[in-house]
Image: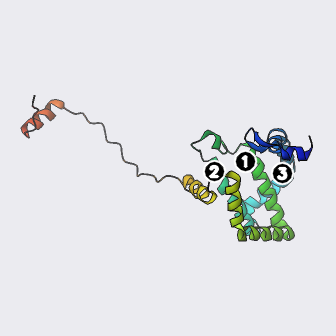
Amino acid sequence: MALPTLLAKAGNFRGYATKLGEHFHIDTKELVRKLISLGYKKFSPIVAYKEKNGWIKDHVKADLESFDFVAKIMLHPMNHEHMAGWKDKNDPNYIMLKQIMEIKAVVQDEDSFYDMIELVRLKWVHEHWDLYEQSAEKAYQIINFPNFYKDLIEHSKPLPQLPKKEAPEEMEINYVEAEEELMRDGMERKG
């Protein structure tokens, strides 16, 4: 099937916007995951070293922390079964994206040319953020992206913990004495 045909066939394809989206998610994503994992094997010793000894550039570490922040939200259980995010850190999408982020981090940390390119790109994104919000609202048409983001962040915060109270010791109640005490206090039952 030709690419223009795949792009032109917009509609409901198992929840994806186009036939191409369905094709990617159903047919090719597993291959992409495997190729990324294969490449990641070359980077994983460097990632482990940098995690143990520290990243050269603080903003590269912050970029990884931003992914961990999003991952924490995605791992948070939702109230809707189709918005479950990732089940755990063994989820293949979590693994794929984590590997991509760590490969990117190694390249940025070690190569200032690519690091500067990414910093300029991020600066542009920051300066044009309203375009991203408007596009997201238009694309999803059912949510207000800024409110969705705010609610998602609020939803991911842990609930306040109540102080633990000591469980009262079991006590034996003498109901006869308790009733007699009530009667003495003028609280006798009528009827």
Mark 1, residue position = 94
* 86 is higher (above) or lower (below) than 174: below
Extreme residue in the top direction? 191
Which quadrant is the N terminus positioned in? Answer: top right
172 over 149 or under it: above or below: above
Q: For the residues carrying marks 1 and 2, which lies nearer the camera in this image?
A: 2
At label 1, which amino acid type do we have? Tyr
Residue 32 shown left or right of residue 85 in the figure = right
Cα distance in 3D space between marks 3 and 1: 14 Å
Residue kind at label 3, given as amino acid type: Tyr
The disc placed on residue 73 is none
Marks 1 and 2 sit apart, C-alpha to C-alpha, by 26 Å
| Residue 88 picture location, percent across and down | 66, 43
| Image location (x, y in percent) of residue 90 | 71, 42
Question: Which of the labelled discs sits on residue 142, or is there none?
Answer: 2
Q: Which residue is mark 3?
A: 40
Quadrant the C terminus occupies: top left
Residue 121 found in image quarter: bottom right
Q: Quadrant of residue 59?
A: bottom right
Identity of the residue drawn at 64% across and 40% down: 82
Give the residue furthest to the right. Answer: 2
> Which comes before the other along the chain, label 3 or label 1?
3
> What is the crowding at mark 2: few (fewer than 14 residues within 10 Å), some, or many (at least 20)?
few
Is residue 179 in view from this perspective?
Answer: yes
